[in-house]
Image (cartoon, grey):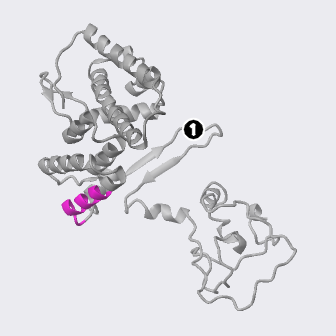
Amino acid sequence: MGSRGVVDRQTVTAIFDALDAAADRLVGLDFDALTTPEWLVLLGRCEKVRRRLPVAEHQLINNLARQASAEELGGKLSHAIADWALTSRTEASRRSNAAADLGPRRALTGEPIAPVLAGAAAAQCDGTIGAEHIAVIRRFCRQLPGWVDQATRERAEAQLARQGGQVRPEQLSGLAATIADRLNPDGTYRDEDRARRRALMLGSQQADGMSELRARITPSCAPPWKPCWPSWPPRACATPNPKPPVWTAVPVRPPSTPTPAQRPNALMTGCWPGCAPCWRPESWVSTTAYPRRSSCRPRWPNWKPLPDRDSPAAAPCCR
């Protein structure tokens, strides 16, 4: 990375003014007189400049995170970044997290410390890797198991940073997967690895009052929730029906919940489990015209033949 020295306010302001002036001259150029190879070369130079600009942002964001108070920022750091840069809070949070990994750090006593991802930070400063390459490297380091020592992590991260300047992000992702398999050939199947990845996230409430719930649960937590989701019948037998299907003009009454994703919610919030046996065969998930075997029935504990929708035996909400 380039040398960093203490500069005064006038120098910083002059450098940013020169950058703005250079950008004004650049956007006013006309490139019609150039050739195809020259256009491609200039595109590469534009990409290199674009990759190097976040290096200054990392230091600014880290200074704010280390020294600015919530009263000065008017709230959280990501919110202040979003308000001043006029970006979304999601993008501001992404920049804050990237600065924590790629920006310079300070010890408690004030000494400068290398970034968490030193190899990726140096490559970004040189303009050889971009945001997509860095996302691959950060994901690789995050998914490594906890027993991998720090020296091995640093060597692997430095190797990915060097290779990132020669390949595209999707190619770097394949290389990262290869290195991860060599470092951890048994996979992340231990309880400690699962504990690191488990999560429960509740999204913000939407305009219609609904919220999105996403979760990654452990094997011991999954069984109690499985009864809440109906087990649909297996795929029909592989022998096609020798008789062609007969179409009638009688319309079939559509199910009350049209998609499989909505049915567990309807069952749990409504008459679960009393209405479970009352789902008619036409509401099952089926994309074939093959006949259904007699064993292909819903796997409910107390399953009985389906009553007619208008029969008194049917649940009130299914009529």
Q: Image quarter for residue 92?
A: top left
Q: Can residue 75 be seen in this view?
A: no
For mark 1, does the 10 Å Cα neighbourhood hold few (<14), some (14 to 19), or many (20 or more) residues?
A: few
Image position, residue 209 (x, y; %):
63, 39
The residue tagged 1 is: 205
- With 34 as the anchor, is 166 left or right in this view? left
With 109 as the anchor, is 276 left or right in this view?
Answer: right
Q: Residue at x 46, y 62 (%)?
A: 224
Q: What is the secondary structure assignment of the residue under circle 1?
A: loop
Quarter of the rendering occupied by the C terminus: bottom right
Name the image quarter holding the N terminus: top left
Residue 292 vertical placement versus 41 (above, below): below
233 vs 4: above or below: below
User: Residue placed at 45% from the left, 25% from the top?
Assistant: 29
Identify which amino acid the numbered label 1 is placed on: Gln
Res. 143 visible in picture = yes
Q: How many marks?
A: 1
User: Residue 72 in the image: x percent, y percent?
Assistant: 37, 14
Question: Of residues 296 and 223, which is closer to you in this image?
Answer: 296
Q: Where is residue 33 in the image (x, y as percent from the top left)?
A: 46, 33
Report the residue at 38% width, 15% height from top: 71
Extent of the magenta region: 174-186
Quarter residue 119 falls in: top left
Q: Return the residue found at the far right.
A: 249
| Residue 249 location, quadrant | bottom right
Q: Residue at x 27, y 57 (%)?
A: 175
